[in-house]
């Protein structure tokens, strides 16, 4: 049983406050996201199986985004699947300058380390060399322009992933016991996610199929 990519797509997005096309992303990232932390629960077929937190830290023109996720699937009290993920993104003036992550996918280690060198992101995945376009955005999804991309950086394996995104309009979604009007986007291709953004722009829910056919949801707490 595999849940590779479970933690992809759980993070804050602010479409409502992001500049229009052609506006400066430097200006946007100077004020968004604000420093702080978001917490989510991860649910599989109605059962809680884990948590994820995302922390935003500002220092001048630098932004650090740290993601922590922990998943345990049990049957009759026995753990049958475990997944952990730790990632750190370093942004400066709107550009990704460094990325690193360590994951354990049910015993399979995944270690990514990248740094911006000129117009390329160079580094390693499990010791093997990586050389990727410097314009790639990680599929952590917190940047609002993620939904405008056709290629994203896989934060677990450091690969480029082809995607398409469709606007599905507004839907009612329950958040912390209250119904809100959320904007739904459907991502397909090498990453499959349905993502709902609340009125304030943050992700309130993510849904996607597990590789065993189960349905996984990520819900803002």
Image: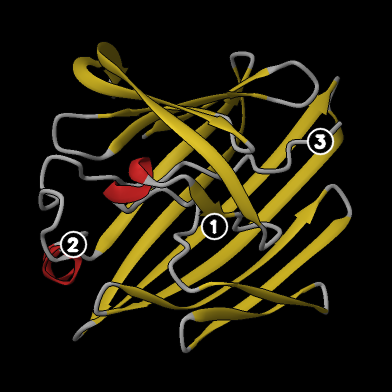
Under circle 2, the secondary element is loop
Label count reads 3
Cα separation, mark 1 vs mark 2, equals 18 Å
Please indicate whether residue 155 sits to the left or right of residue 31 in the image: right
Nearer-N-terminus badge (1/2): 2
Between 165 and 218, which is closer to the camera in this rendering? 165
Nearer-N-terminus badge (3/2): 3
Q: Name the residue under label 2.
A: 34
Q: Position of residue 205 (x, y in %)?
A: 39, 27
Q: Which residue is drawn at 47% across and 45% down?
A: 150
Nearer-N-terminus badge (3/1): 3
Q: Position of residue 120 (x, y in %)?
A: 53, 80
Mark seen at residue 2: 3
Q: Residue at x 80, y 21 (%)?
A: 212
Residue 171 vertical position relative to residue 26 in the rendered view, above or below: above
Image quarter of residue 184 = top left
Mark seen at residue 68: 1
Residue 87 vertical position relative to residue 187 in the rendered view, above or below: below
Q: Where is residue 119 in the image (x, y as percent from the top left)?
A: 46, 81
Q: Residue at x 60, y 63 (%)?
A: 86
Label 3 neighbourhood size at 10 Å, few (<14), some (14-19), many (20+)? few
Between 84 and 31, which is closer to the camera in this rendering? 31
């Amino acid at each position: 049983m595999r849940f590779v990519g479970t933690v992809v797509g759980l993070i804050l997005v602010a479409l409502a406050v992001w500049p229009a096309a052609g506006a400066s992303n430097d200006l946007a990232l100077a004020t968004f996201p604000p420093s702080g932390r978001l917490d989510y629960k991860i649910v599989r077929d109605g059962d809680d199986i884990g948590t994820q937190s995302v922390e935003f830290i500002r220092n001048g023109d630098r932004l650090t985004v740290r993601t922590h996720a922990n998943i345990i699937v049990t049957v009759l009290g026995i753990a049958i699947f475990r997944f952990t993920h730790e990632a750190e993104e370093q942004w400066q003036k709107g550009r990704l300058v460094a990325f690193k992550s360590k994951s354990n996918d049910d015993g399979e280690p995944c270690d990514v380390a990248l740094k911006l060198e000129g117009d390329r992101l160079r580094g390693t995945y499990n010791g093997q060399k990586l050389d990727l376009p410097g314009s790639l955005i990680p599929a952590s999804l917190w940047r609002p322009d993620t939904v405008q991309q056709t290629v994203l950086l896989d934060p677990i394996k450091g690969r480029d992933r082809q995607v398409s995104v469709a606007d599905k309009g507004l839907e009612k979604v329950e958040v912390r016991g209250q119904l809100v009007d959320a904007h739904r986007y459907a991502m397909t291709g090498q990453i499959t996610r349905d993502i709902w953004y609340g009125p304030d722009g943050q992700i309130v829910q993510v849904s996607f199929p597990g590789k065993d056919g189960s349905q996984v949801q990520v819900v803002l707490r």
